[in-house]
Amino acid sequence: MDSALIPQGVKRCPFPQFALWIGFLSIFMLWAVVAAGVAWIKGLNTTNLNDYFGFGAWITADLAVIALGGGAFFTGFMRYILGIEDFKHILNFAVIIGFVCYSSALVILGLDVGQPLRSWFIFWHANVHSMLTEVAFCISCYFTVLTIEYIPLVLENRQLDKIPLVHNFSHNLHRIMAVFAATGAFLSFFHQGSLGGTVGVLFGRPFGFREHFAIWPTAFFLFIISAMACGPCFTILVTRITELITRKKLVKQNVIAKLAKVSGWLMVAYLALKMIDTVYWAMVTLPNMGVSVMDMYPESPFTIWILIAELGFCGAIPAIILITEKGRNNNFLLVPATILSCFGAILNRYVMTVQTLALPVLPFDKFVNYIPNWVEWVTSLAPFVYLALLISLSYRYLPVFPQEKELNP
Amino acid sequence: MFPFCFEWHWDLGHMVFHGALWYALSILGIGLTYAAIKSFIDLKKGGHH
């Protein structure tokens, strides 16, 4: 039925099977649209956000998808700026993942601000003393970059490519893609860092506050490195899931292994710096503020185990697997390592936002826990379904994987 | 965002923030315009890559 749109030389499942799959994903997306509509029409009182938790599931989801989408900018940086040619075989896929992550982040931010119709205020009446202004500028610009990087892939669709003007435009965009990739890398380094910096400057919140290096808190640098480490892991994980579902090999093992190796060594660097930062925070910063490290982990779910889970189970274990040749070349170890790495990044973004807000800082404050309601859960998980939806459509109709024909003769 | 907005000041903060924003937007705009114009020129010349 749609065979004229499918790239030449590759096999895809029958259209009815594909339509059923898209229909199944669309049901969840429809549910997410209803949840978003409830939040926008009835207001934020339909969520479990309150005076204690002005930010909750949405900000965690926002920061998490931005970190997981870091694979797009970092793979682009390695491909176009550092000239590592191997990564061109996975770059298209990383761009799709990044596109989904950043468009989701913008929609979730639209929910979180409560008044999306006033989102343009942050540009028009910019507060130049706020890290969030920089984040807003960079995320919007970087989403534009990702769209520009995604356009040539869409235009390479078998039917669109037959139109001479479309073909030329796609070709010319490809020729100058390095300029866009460099701009994207510049924007990403800053907004990934500023997301950490936003928490790191909160001197009234000892859990989030960090010492400064020049004008930036250390969290600024840690967020950049953690996104560089976990972004490629998420790209590898989604590639493996796509291969599992399609029952095809889509990217050569040497490309995956190289990406895993880079990611693994970045995780080692991140863990080393994070541990130094945590020890200094516990031994110097917190005592100077009149609190101890155990005050930061008072009761469930915010016990010291959350720190051990973040740095140990979801940090050290995947790092060891990824830096060893046997580990990264063994799928039974590689996939769990990428899952742990991604979960570690999500956990880090969760504690840096929700735990920072949860801990009482005034004598009359009490410890209050926060559990998102269905509106927040559905809209926060929707990016993963949206990712499945866009990957399904792109995989079927666009030449996403340059090595697919060779690997599946 | 623009010098004609009422809260605009010609200070370092505004120049750095908005300078970087307009710098990035300019690169993206010029890049897209170049690709579009080049595509039309290629088409007029009868070129098809």
Image: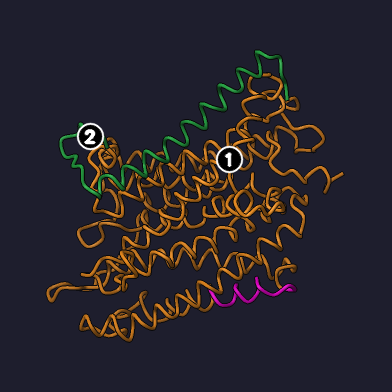
Chain colours: A orange, B green
Quadrant in which residue A196 is drawn: bottom left
Confirm or deny contact between disc 1 and disc 2 (CB under 8 A): no
Residue A177, x across and y down, in percent = 59, 39
> What's the residue type where badge 2 is placed?
Pro
Do the dots labelled 1 and 2 sit on one chain? no
**Furthest residue in direction right, as rendered:** A409
Residue A65, given in percent of the width and then of the height, sits at: 47, 54
Type of the residue with mark 1:
Leu
Q: Residues within 10 Å of mark 1 (few under 14, many from 20)?
A: some
Where is mark 2, residue-wise?
Answer: B3
In the rendered image, which residue does mark 1 sit on? A390
**Circle 2 chain:** B
Q: Circle 1 — which element?
A: helix
A35 over B41 or under it: above or below: below
SS under mark 2: loop
x then y, percent, for residue A274: 45, 75
Range of residues picked out in magenta = A315-326
Q: Is residue A284 left or right of residue A260?
A: left
Residue A56 vs A405, above or below: the answer is below
| Position of the C terminus of chain A by quadrant | top right
> Which residue is painted at 45% across and 79% down in the image?
A275
Quadrant in which the N terminus of chain A appears = top right
Structural distance between the alpha carbons of marks 1 and 2: 40 Å
Residue A13, percent across and down? Answer: 75, 38
A389 to the left or right of A290: right
Q: Chain of mark 1?
A: A
